[in-house]
Protein backbone atom coordinates (compact mmCIF):
# COMPACT_ATOMS: atom_id res chain seq x y z
CA UNK A 1 0.00 0.00 0.00
CA UNK A 2 1.24 3.51 -0.73
CA UNK A 3 2.28 5.61 2.19
CA UNK A 4 -0.62 7.56 3.59
CA UNK A 5 -0.44 11.22 2.72
CA UNK A 6 -1.63 13.80 5.16
CA UNK A 7 -3.90 16.62 4.17
CA UNK A 8 -2.05 19.85 4.66
CA UNK A 9 -3.52 22.66 6.67
CA UNK A 10 -3.73 25.99 4.94
CA UNK A 11 -4.69 29.16 6.76
CA UNK A 12 -5.25 31.45 3.89
CA UNK A 13 -6.08 30.84 0.29
CA UNK A 14 -4.37 33.09 -2.24
CA UNK A 15 -6.26 36.27 -3.01
CA UNK A 16 -5.17 36.07 -6.63
CA UNK A 17 -5.18 32.73 -8.35
CA UNK A 18 -3.54 33.52 -11.69
CA UNK A 19 -0.44 35.59 -12.40
CA UNK A 20 0.11 36.37 -16.05
CA UNK A 21 2.87 38.29 -17.79
CA UNK A 22 1.46 41.53 -19.23
CA UNK A 23 1.07 42.04 -22.93
CA UNK A 24 1.24 38.44 -24.06
CA UNK A 25 -1.86 36.44 -25.00
CA UNK A 26 -2.42 33.64 -22.51
CA UNK A 27 -2.61 31.01 -25.22
CA UNK A 28 0.98 31.72 -26.18
CA UNK A 29 2.18 31.15 -22.65
CA UNK A 30 2.90 28.00 -20.78
CA UNK A 31 1.13 27.59 -17.50
CA UNK A 32 2.72 26.53 -14.25
CA UNK A 33 0.38 25.00 -11.70
CA UNK A 34 1.24 25.92 -8.14
CA UNK A 35 -0.79 23.91 -5.63
CA UNK A 36 -2.39 25.82 -2.78
CA UNK A 37 -0.31 23.92 -0.22
CA UNK A 38 2.81 24.96 -2.12
CA UNK A 39 1.60 28.55 -2.04
CA UNK A 40 1.04 28.24 1.72
CA UNK A 41 4.56 26.89 2.28
CA UNK A 42 5.97 29.82 0.34
CA UNK A 43 3.82 32.25 2.30
CA UNK A 44 4.86 30.89 5.69
CA UNK A 45 8.57 30.54 4.95
CA UNK A 46 9.36 33.39 2.59
CA UNK A 47 6.62 35.93 3.26
CA UNK A 48 6.12 35.47 7.01
CA UNK A 49 9.78 34.53 7.49
CA UNK A 50 8.87 31.54 9.64
CA UNK A 51 11.38 28.75 10.22
CA UNK A 52 10.64 25.43 8.61
CA UNK A 53 10.05 23.60 11.88
CA UNK A 54 7.27 25.99 12.97
CA UNK A 55 5.84 26.19 9.48
CA UNK A 56 5.69 22.42 9.12
CA UNK A 57 3.78 22.18 12.42
CA UNK A 58 1.30 24.77 11.27
CA UNK A 59 0.67 22.85 8.07
CA UNK A 60 0.48 19.53 9.92
CA UNK A 61 3.25 17.85 7.94
CA UNK A 62 6.73 16.59 8.77
CA UNK A 63 9.68 18.89 8.33
CA UNK A 64 11.11 16.94 5.36
CA UNK A 65 7.70 17.07 3.69
CA UNK A 66 7.48 20.79 4.29
CA UNK A 67 10.95 21.22 2.84
CA UNK A 68 9.92 19.28 -0.24
CA UNK A 69 6.74 21.34 -0.72
CA UNK A 70 8.66 24.59 -0.26
CA UNK A 71 11.42 23.59 -2.68
CA UNK A 72 8.87 22.69 -5.30
CA UNK A 73 7.02 25.97 -4.77
CA UNK A 74 10.19 28.06 -5.02
CA UNK A 75 11.26 26.29 -8.17
CA UNK A 76 7.90 26.82 -9.84
CA UNK A 77 7.72 30.51 -8.96
CA UNK A 78 11.31 31.08 -10.06
CA UNK A 79 10.64 29.27 -13.33
CA UNK A 80 7.55 31.37 -13.92
CA UNK A 81 9.44 34.61 -13.35
CA UNK A 82 12.51 33.65 -15.37
CA UNK A 83 10.66 32.17 -18.30
CA UNK A 84 7.73 34.61 -18.21
CA UNK A 85 5.02 32.02 -17.80
CA UNK A 86 1.54 32.05 -16.32
CA UNK A 87 1.41 30.89 -12.71
CA UNK A 88 -1.92 29.44 -11.67
CA UNK A 89 -2.52 28.69 -7.99
CA UNK A 90 -5.02 25.89 -7.67
CA UNK A 91 -5.68 22.48 -6.20
CA UNK A 92 -3.44 20.41 -3.98
CA UNK A 93 -4.02 18.28 -0.92
CA UNK A 94 -5.15 20.74 1.67
CA UNK A 95 -7.90 21.68 4.04
CA UNK A 96 -8.56 25.13 5.41
CA UNK A 97 -7.57 25.53 9.03
CA UNK A 98 -10.72 27.47 9.88
CA UNK A 99 -12.93 24.71 8.51
CA UNK A 100 -14.61 26.90 5.92
CA UNK A 101 -15.46 25.72 2.46
CA UNK A 102 -16.64 22.39 1.15
CA UNK A 103 -14.93 19.28 -0.11
CA UNK A 104 -16.74 17.37 -2.81
CA UNK A 105 -16.16 13.96 -4.34
CA UNK A 106 -15.75 14.41 -8.07
CA UNK A 107 -17.12 10.94 -8.80
CA UNK A 108 -20.36 10.83 -6.80
CA UNK A 109 -20.84 14.45 -5.73
CA UNK A 110 -20.84 13.60 -2.03
CA UNK A 111 -20.03 16.54 0.20
CA UNK A 112 -17.36 15.68 2.73
CA UNK A 113 -16.69 17.27 6.07
CA UNK A 114 -13.06 18.42 5.96
CA UNK A 115 -12.60 16.98 9.44
CA UNK A 116 -13.37 13.53 8.03
CA UNK A 117 -10.28 13.79 5.89
CA UNK A 118 -8.07 13.93 8.95
CA UNK A 119 -8.94 10.27 9.29
CA UNK A 120 -9.50 9.09 5.76
CA UNK A 121 -8.47 10.26 2.34
CA UNK A 122 -11.21 8.66 0.31
CA UNK A 123 -14.85 9.47 -0.26
CA UNK A 124 -16.94 7.94 2.56
CA UNK A 125 -19.72 7.11 0.10
CA UNK A 126 -17.96 5.65 -2.95
CA UNK A 127 -14.33 5.31 -1.88
CA UNK A 128 -13.09 7.60 -4.64
CA UNK A 129 -9.84 9.46 -4.20
CA UNK A 130 -10.91 12.23 -6.54
CA UNK A 131 -11.84 14.74 -3.91
CA UNK A 132 -11.82 18.37 -4.79
CA UNK A 133 -12.00 21.50 -2.75
CA UNK A 134 -14.78 23.92 -3.52
CA UNK A 135 -14.72 27.42 -2.19
CA UNK A 136 -17.98 28.78 -0.92
CA UNK A 137 -18.59 31.04 -3.93
CA UNK A 138 -17.81 28.31 -6.39
CA UNK A 139 -20.02 25.93 -4.47
CA UNK A 140 -22.99 28.27 -4.68
CA UNK A 141 -22.47 28.76 -8.39
CA UNK A 142 -22.60 25.08 -9.19
CA UNK A 143 -26.03 24.31 -10.57
CA UNK A 144 -27.55 21.07 -9.44
CA UNK A 145 -24.75 20.26 -7.08
CA UNK A 146 -26.82 21.06 -4.01
CA UNK A 147 -30.29 20.12 -2.92
CA UNK A 148 -29.92 16.50 -3.97
CA UNK A 149 -28.51 15.07 -0.79
CA UNK A 150 -31.66 15.35 1.28
CA UNK A 151 -29.51 16.69 4.08
ZN1 LIG B 1 -17.70 9.61 -3.87
Image: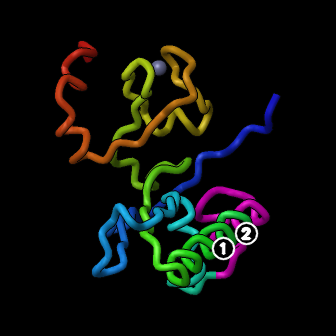
Q: Residue at x 59, y 61 (%)?
A: 59
Does residue 23 belong to the magenta stretch? no
**x then y, percent, for residue 114:** 46, 39
Q: Viewed as shown, does residue 43 lie left or right of 145?
A: right
Q: Is mark 2 within 8 Å of ligand 1?
A: no
Q: Label 1 crowding class (10 Å Cα cut-off): few <14, some 14-19, many 20+?
A: few
**Magenta segment boundaries in residue numbering:** 51-67
Residue 77: name its quadrant: bottom right
Magenta span main SS: helix
How many numbered marks does the figure carry?
Answer: 2
Residue at numbered disc 2: 67
Q: Viewed as shown, does residue 86 lie left or right of 65?
A: left
Residue at numbered disc 1: 54
**x then y, percent, for residue 1:** 82, 28
Q: Residue at x 66, y 45 (%)?
A: 6
From this view, report whether residue 86 is shown above or below residue 108. Answer: below
**x then y, percent, for residue 72:** 66, 67
**x then y, percent, for residue 95:** 48, 49
Q: Quadrant of the C terminus?
A: top left
Does residue 63 belong to the magenta stretch? yes
Q: Residue at x 58, y 53 (%)?
A: 8
Q: Give whichever of discs 2 and 1 has the lower sequence position.
A: 1
Amino acid sequence: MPRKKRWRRVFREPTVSVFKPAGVPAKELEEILLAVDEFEALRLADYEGMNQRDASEIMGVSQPTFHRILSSARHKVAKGLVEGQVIRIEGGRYILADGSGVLVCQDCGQEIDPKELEKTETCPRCGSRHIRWLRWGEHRDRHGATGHHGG
